[in-house]
Image: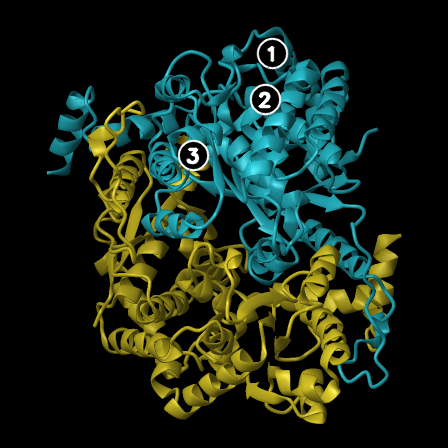
Chain colours: A cyan, B yellow
Amino acid sequence: MKKIQVDIKDALTGSLAGSLETLRPEGLSGLAKLTDGSGEGADFLGWVKLPSETSADLLDDINATAAALREKCDVVVAIGIGGSYLGAKAVIEALSNSFAAYEPAKTRVLFAGQNIGEDYLAELKDYLADKQFGIIVISKSGTTTEPAIAFRVLREQLEQQVGRKEAAARIVAVTDAKRGALRTLADTEGYKTYVIADNVGGRFSVLTPVGLLPIAVAGFDIKALVAGAAEMEAATLTGADSDALNYAITRNALYRDGKKIEILVNFNPKLHFVGEWWKQLYGESEGKDHKGIFPAAVDDTTDLHSMGQWIQDGERSIFETVLSVKTTDRELRIPRDESDLDGLNYIAGKRVDEVNKMAELRTRIAHVDGGVPNILVTLDDVKEDTLGQLIYFFEAACGISGYMLGVNPFNQPGVEAYKKNMFALLEKPGYEEATAAIRAKLK
Amino acid sequence: MKKIQVDIKDALTGSLAGSLETLRPEGLSGLAKLTDGSGEGADFLGWVKLPSETSADLLDDINATAAALREKCDVVVAIGIGGSYLGAKAVIEALSNSFAAYEPAKTRVLFAGQNIGEDYLAELKDYLADKQFGIIVISKSGTTTEPAIAFRVLREQLEQQVGRKEAAARIVAVTDAKRGALRTLADTEGYKTYVIADNVGGRFSVLTPVGLLPIAVAGFDIKALVAGAAEMEAATLTGADSDALNYAITRNALYRDGKKIEILVNFNPKLHFVGEWWKQLYGESEGKDHKGIFPAAVDDTTDLHSMGQWIQDGERSIFETVLSVKTTDRELRIPRDESDLDGLNYIAGKRVDEVNKMAELRTRIAHVDGGVPNILVTLDDVKEDTLGQLIYFFEAACGISGYMLGVNPFNQPGVEAYKKNMFALLEKPGYEEATAAIRAKLK
C-alpha cells in the first residue's frame, strides 16, 4: 500500500506552473538512465532493483546474526561513517522511543568511527568497560581512517575483555567480497561477514547489510523496511508520473529559477537523522562541478524559533520540502485546568498533534506567501514499511535529479580526495609523493 | 586569560585582502551602537554589559536553587523553546560526557516544550512516571504555544505524583518580572521565580537565569561561564581590533562578495548544539528584509563524509567558520597491533586527536584551495570559561554584524507573526479577526 504522498502544487507556481510537463522528458530521460545504464556512473546502479531482488534468505540470515548478537551483547557498536552510518542511524532513531537512551535496553546500538573524537572514543571505552559488547564494523576498504581507528581501539578492548576467540564470535564485518584490509582481517580471524556490493555506493547502501544489520540488532523489522522499498521501486520504475520523478523535476525547476537551498523540514523530532541521511544523499550526489542545490534540514517546530525568521524573511533563495506524518503512535490530549491561570483552556481537550498540524499548516501558508516554494511529502506514519518507501523515493529521485542537473550522481571525487589526502598527511607508506607535496605546501 | 583566537587570514584574500581596514569604520560604527544605543533595537541591549554586571548574589542564588532541585529530583525537565532552550542545551552538551545519557546520573536535565511532538511528550510522561522530577519553565509571556502545552501537561503529572504543594516546591519559573500568564501562575502557586529582563532577547539570554539555571542543575560551573563572558566583554567593548569586530567585518565582506552561506564547522561532536545555538543567534538576527547570510552547521569529520563533497565542489557561494579545540580532556593513543592486518600501524602510538587535527588541517587547505574562504576560531579547550568567552564573542559579533548589514539585529518579526498566527489558527479568544482571515484563506 502506498504510504507516501507528494504534493508539489505550492512549489511550481507563477512562471514555473508548467514545469512538470515541460521538464518531464528530461526527467524521464534521467529515469531511463537508472534502468538502462546509459548515463554516467552506471557502475553504481546496484541499488535500483535492490529491494525487489533482496532474497528472503539474506534477510533471514541477517536476522539470525542480529539475534545472536542480541543474545550475547548488552551493547553493539556499529562502526562506520557516511553512508555506513547515517542510514542505520536514521532508521533506528525514527523508530525508537525518544527517551530510549535513558531507559534500560535489551541490546543498545551505539555508533563509533563516525568521527575522530579523542574524548568520544575514550568515553566510549569507559562506558563499554563493564558491558558485554559486540561490534559491527562497516567499511568497504577497511582503510578509511575514522572507522579503522575506532575498530582497532575497540577490537583490542573486546579481545582484552572476553578473549580473542569470543571476540571473533561477537564481531561482524560488512565489507568487500574479496579485497581490502577488513576482508583480510575478517577472513583471518574468522568473523561472520556480509558483502558490500561493488555496484552500490555508500549513500545508497542503507537497504544492504550496511544498514540492515544494525537496524535488525536494534530490534526493528528489516523485512517490512525492504518490502516498503520494493513497493516504491515498482511504483517508480514503471510509472511515467511517479512521485520520485515529480520531486526530481520540481527541485530542478526551482534550482534553475534561482532557488539555491533546499530545506528538508520535519515536524517530528524522530526524523532528525532522516534529514542528515538525506543531506548526504543529495549533497554528495549533486554537489559537484560548482553546482547543485545546497541541502539543509530543520526540525520544526523547534527550529521555527531559530531558523524560522531567516526562512520567513531572509534571501528568497530557498525552497522547503516538508515531511508531514499523518498519525502519531501515541495519543495525548491537552488537559483542562479549572483555574486556567496559563490561559490554555481554549485548546484543552485537543490532541497535541492537532496543534502540531496547525503549526505545520500555518508555517506552510506563511512561507509560501513569503516567497518560499513548498513541496509536501506526507507519510502515513513512522513505521518500517513507510520508511522503506521514503528511502527508495528519495534515492530514485536523487538519481533522476542528478542526471537532470548534468552531473554524475554516483561519484564523490571530493570525498575520495579527502581520504587520500588524509593518508598523505598521516605519512602512510605508499603515499610518499603526496606527503612531500602537502608538506611543501604547508611550509 | 584569553582562551579564544580568531584567524581570518584565509578568509580575506585576493580582492578582499584590504577589507579589514576598509570596513573597519563601519564595524566600529556597529560596535558603537551596541554601547551608545543609537541603533535600531536599542531597547534590547541588556546583554551587552550583562556578564560584568551579573552579581555574585544572583549566581549564588541560582546555585542554591539548583542544589535544592538536585537534592529532590532524579530528573529536571527544562521547558522552553528557541533562546529558552538552545543556549542551555549547547552548554550542557558541550560539557557532558558523550555517553552520559546511558549512564546513571545524580540529576538528569531533559528538555521539553521545544517541539509539539505528541509522541515525544507521551514518551516523556512515561519516562517520568516512576521518577522524582522537577520542572524549570522558561517563558517570558507564558503563552508561547510549545512550552505552554508542555508545562500544563507535565505540571498536571507532577501534581498527581507528589501533590500540589510539593510540586510547587519543585517548579521554578523563569519569566517576566510582572506581566504574563506564567508570572500570574507562579505568584499564585508560590513558585520560586527568576526574571527575564525586558532588554535581553531570547537568543541573547543564555547568560541570564534562562540558561544559567538549567546549566547549574546539570552540575556545571556558571560562575566560570559568566566570568569567561565578562573577560570577552572587556576585550570587545574596549578594543578597536577585537576578535568580534574582525569576525563581523570579515563575514560582511564575504557576504557582499557573494558568499551567501556560512557553515559553522566543529571537529568535536560535543559542540553540535553550539552550532544550533549559533544558527538561531545569526539567522534570527540577520535574516530579514530579504537579506542575510544563511547559517548552516556541520559536525566534522562526520559530515566530511556527507556534506564534504558539496563543500569541496558545489556552488562557490559558501564560506566556513571552523571551531578548533586545542586540547582534549582525555588521552587515547592508537594501539600497535603485531599482525597489522588492518594496515594501521603507520599511525600506531599517535593520539587520536593528532589524526583529528590532521583531518582539520587537510580540510581547511583543500577547502580554501577549492574556493571556500575560511575563518578559524581556536578554543583552548571545552570548559566553562572558554564557552563563556565564545558565547560573548559570537553575541557581540552578531550585534555588530547585523548593524553592518543594515538590519535591526534585535527584532524577529517573522517569529512574532508565527506566534500570533498560531493563536489565530487555534481560535484563541481575542484573535477572532485573525482567525476569520486565516480560515477564509484556507477555503
Front position among marks 3 and 1? 3
Instruction: Work out whether B270 lies above or below A4.
Output: below
- In percent of width and height, residue B329 lies at 29, 58
Instruction: Work out whether B339 lies above or below B361.
Output: above
Question: Residue at position x 47%, y 80% from top?
Answer: B208
- In percent of width and height, residue B121 lies at 71, 62
Question: Residue at position x 61%, y 21% from top?
Answer: A400
- In percent of width and height, residue A300 lies at 64, 55
- Judge by depth and name the residue closer to the eye, A416 or A182: A182
Front position among marks 3 and 2? 3
Residue on which disc 3 sits: B305
Residue on which disc 1 sits: A33
Residue B23: image quadrant is bottom left
Q: How many numbered marks appear?
A: 3
Disc 3/disc 2 C-alpha distance (Å)? 19 Å
First along the sequence among labels 2 and 1: 1
Residue on which disc 2 sits: A399
Disc 2/disc 1 C-alpha distance (Å)? 9 Å
| Callout 2 touching callout 1 (CB < 8 Å) | yes
Crowding at label 3, few (<14), some or many (≥20) Cα neighbours within 10 Å? many
Question: Residue at position x 14%, y 33% from top?
Answer: A439
Q: Is residue B260 visible?
A: no
| Chain identifier of the residue bearing label 1 in the image | A
